[in-house]
Amino acid sequence: MEISKDQAIRLALHSQLHRQRGLRGKEGVRELVRQLGYVQIDTISVVERAHHHTIWSRIPDYDKAWLDELLAQDRAVFEHWGHAASYLPMEDYRYSLPRMRKFPDTSSWERRFFEKYKHLTRDILRRIEAEGPLGARDFPDTRATKTDYGWGSGKPAKIALELLLWKGELMVDRRENFQRIYELTERVLPDWVDRSLPNEAELRRHQILRSLQALGVGTRADIRGHFSLAASAAFDRQLEELVGAGEIARIEVSGAEDEYYALPEELAKLDEIPGPKDRAYLLSPFDNAVIQRPRLKRLFGFDYTLECYVTPKKRIYGYWSLPVLYQNRFIGRLDCKANRITGLMEVNSLHWESGRPPALPVRRVVQKTFDHFSEFCGCETVRLF
């Protein structure tokens, strides 16, 4: 089957962005995490933290308390590895077990840390078992000197708590002022959660189908990139088996060199996907729709880099430039910052992809989106134009 590039873009944006617009309330957030497969967590809060920004972009009435409740009260989501550190649907818990069982790698600094601090990890687990959920703040820093273990020079107890999370012995019970509070895994997991270890075929099948559900359409590299999977013979074998069984379809995208894949049921509804609406988005740099930069460039012709990781003199578009999507095209980059002292959303720069401002009606739509975003971030808006 062959589809046009415009159809591929329409399917991608429908799956990753547009179809969640009909979701509402806390249950809508739960369904959003399930549809996307994960929502990435990030600590940077230049405007709003990435996970909240990503959800707000799809659910306009989003209340940040809902995500906290889904984690701490409803046990509908949990924290572990998606594309990176992420919120994941609780029903997918068993598919994180293989990563937990393999952690840490035998040659990694994490392994060396565990060997050096065996007594500390034992004490942490004993204290949490006896006292209940605890955070890093509840453990003293007894170091005489600071040592960098790869995640900065944090105190050993803080690092140990996070490593025990990745190992699966602890889970995040809740967040307090964005700080993780940890609990024993068996006291967090709901009774209904499947704890059986999937075999390799089950794991790859889940990863491929979950990824394509979120992506809409994607190359082999896109599918692997959704959950940051390394290339492997097992992945390729499972992909071909799913194609052979008719559970996924191999397709051609006009003008593209790479093979693409999609779910047959999504392709069957391709003509039903609404055309582009008069709507703009200011997306987080960690948003699911833009996090795979090679895919973004290949499919949309949008060459995007998050420049907070480069030195100031090398920045072109700004420290925290947000991709501006209008209808089905990325039309600009807006570098802004929520000034929580003045209560204003500061605009550092606005760059248009075409090199000149779009028509006035388009600018008005972008301004309206910016106004709503500023309000969500707790700031007063400013005029962009």
Image: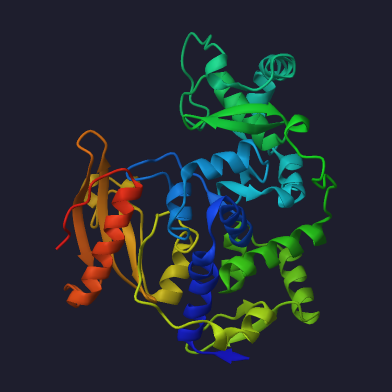
Above or below, 316 against 132 in this view is below
Relative to 250, is 95 on the left or the right? right
State whether residue 231 appears in this view: yes
Between 122 and 145, the residue placed more toward the observer is 122
Looking at the image, which residue is at 82% across and 53% down? 198
* Residue 72 position by quadrant: top right
Compared with 155, 255 (above or below) is: below
Viewer-proximal residue, 157 or 275? Answer: 275
Residue 312 locus on image (x, y percent): 23, 46
* Image x and y of residue 36, in percent: 58, 60
Query: Where residue 85 appears, x then y in whole percent?
Result: 56, 44
Q: Position of residue 62 (x, y in %)?
A: 46, 51
**Residue at (44% x, 83% y) in the render:** 275
Picture quadrant of residue 116? top right
The quarter of the picture where the N terminus appears is: bottom right
Q: How many marks?
A: 0
Give the position of the C terminus as an image quadrant.
bottom left
Q: How is the model colour-coded?
A: rainbow
Q: Specify whether residue 83 is in view.
A: no
Quarter assignment of residue 199: bottom right
Residue 106's place in the image compared with 245, above or below, is above
Asked if 360 appears above or below 381 in the picture, the reply is below
Residue drawn where x is 53% and y is 9% of the image: 142
Q: Nearer the viewer, residue 305 or 281?
A: 281
Q: Residue at x 65, y 18 (%)?
A: 117
Choose between 320 and 308: the one closer to the eye: 320
Q: Is residue 38 left or right of residue 369?
A: right
